[in-house]
């Protein structure tokens, strides 16, 4: 309500610039006082160019581990390199069936709300590879996912659906290690099937 009053009663002709992820989620009374300007997301090349300008050592890797968010990639690389390393360790484990017998310790520190989306995004890449298409989110991992080409896309989809349902409770504080182990067990069913 405060924004509506400010926008409706501003003296002169001031301009306010507000950002929203979704136009439809704004209150109708606020939308009626706004002019909509759609700004397309930055392309992969634009994101990488910006990260190169920030002098990151591995901008491609950081951007993929930050799920395509360049600000998050910069933040992780400069302020939380340990978290970035945990995300990379998780993806390396997921990509390596020979390691699936032993889940690395400490991964839960990265948070299941981050690790599950990384795994689900990797599953999407694996489904693409199994269908003969190139990986998009983690192209650097493609060489480690040759085993995924032997999987049936339906099997990958089933694990994706299980992880998606697990994501709904992933942030529960009781036992993140238990959630991580559940995710790992489901992932292992993929590598055991080849």
Image: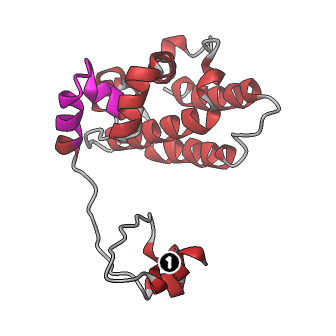
* Helix, strand or loop for disc 1: helix
- In this rendered view, identify the residue nearer to me: 98 or 70: 70
Q: Position of residue 79 (x, y in %)?
A: 45, 22
- Compared across the picture, whether 115 is left or right of 57 comes to right
Q: Is residue 191 above or below residue 6?
A: above
Q: Is residue 152 magenta?
A: no
- Can residue 35 be seen by looking at this rendering? yes
Q: Does the magenta stretch include residue 60?
A: yes
Q: Position of residue 91 (x, y in %)?
A: 46, 24
- Can residue 95 be seen by looking at this rendering? no
Q: In which quarter of the image is the N terminus?
A: bottom right
Q: Which residue lies furthest to the right in this view?
A: 174
Q: Is residue 123 above or below residue 52?
A: below
Q: Mark 1 points at which residue?
A: 6
Secondary structure of the magenta portion, mostly? helix
Quarter assignment of residue 132:
top left
- Compared across the picture, whether 41 is left or right of 79 comes to left
- In this rendered view, identify the residue nearer to me: 55 or 153: 55
Q: What stretch is highlighted in magenta?
A: 47-63
Residue drawn at point x = 59 percent, y = 49 percent: 161
Q: Which residue lies furthest to the front in this view?
A: 11
Residue drawn at point x = 45 percent, y = 69 percent: 22
Q: Position of residue 165 (x, y in %)?
A: 67, 49
Residue drawn at point x = 61 percent, y = 12 percent: 101
Q: Where is residue 72 in the image (x, y as percent from the top left)?
A: 41, 36
Say few, some or many: other residues with alpha carbon within 10 Å of mark 1 (under 14 / 14 to 19 / 20 or more). Answer: few
């Amino acid at each position: 309500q405060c924004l509506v009053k400010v926008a409706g009663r501003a003296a002169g002709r001031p301009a306010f610039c507000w950002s929203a992820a979704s136009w439809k989620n704004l209150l109708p009374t606020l939308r009626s006082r706004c002019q909509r300007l759609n700004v397309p997301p930055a392309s992969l090349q634009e994101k990488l160019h910006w990260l190169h300008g920030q002098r990151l050592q591995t901008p491609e890797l950081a951007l993929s581990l930050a799920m395509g968010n360049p600000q998050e990639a910069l933040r992780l690389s400069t302020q939380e390199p340990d978290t970035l390393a945990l995300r990379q360790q998780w993806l390396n484990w997921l990509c390596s069936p020979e390691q699936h017998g032993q889940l690395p310790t400490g991964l839960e520190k990265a948070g299941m709300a981050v690790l599950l989306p990384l795994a689900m995004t990797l599953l999407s890449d694996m489904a693409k590879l199994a269908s003969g298409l190139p990986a998009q989110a983690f192209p650097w991992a493609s060489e480690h996912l040759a085993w995924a080409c032997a999987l049936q896309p339906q099997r990958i989809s089933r694990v994706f659906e299980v992880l998606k349902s697990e994501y709904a409770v992933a942030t529960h504080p009781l036992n993140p290690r238990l959630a991580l182990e559940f995710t790992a067990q489901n992932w292992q069913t993929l590598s055991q099937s080849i």
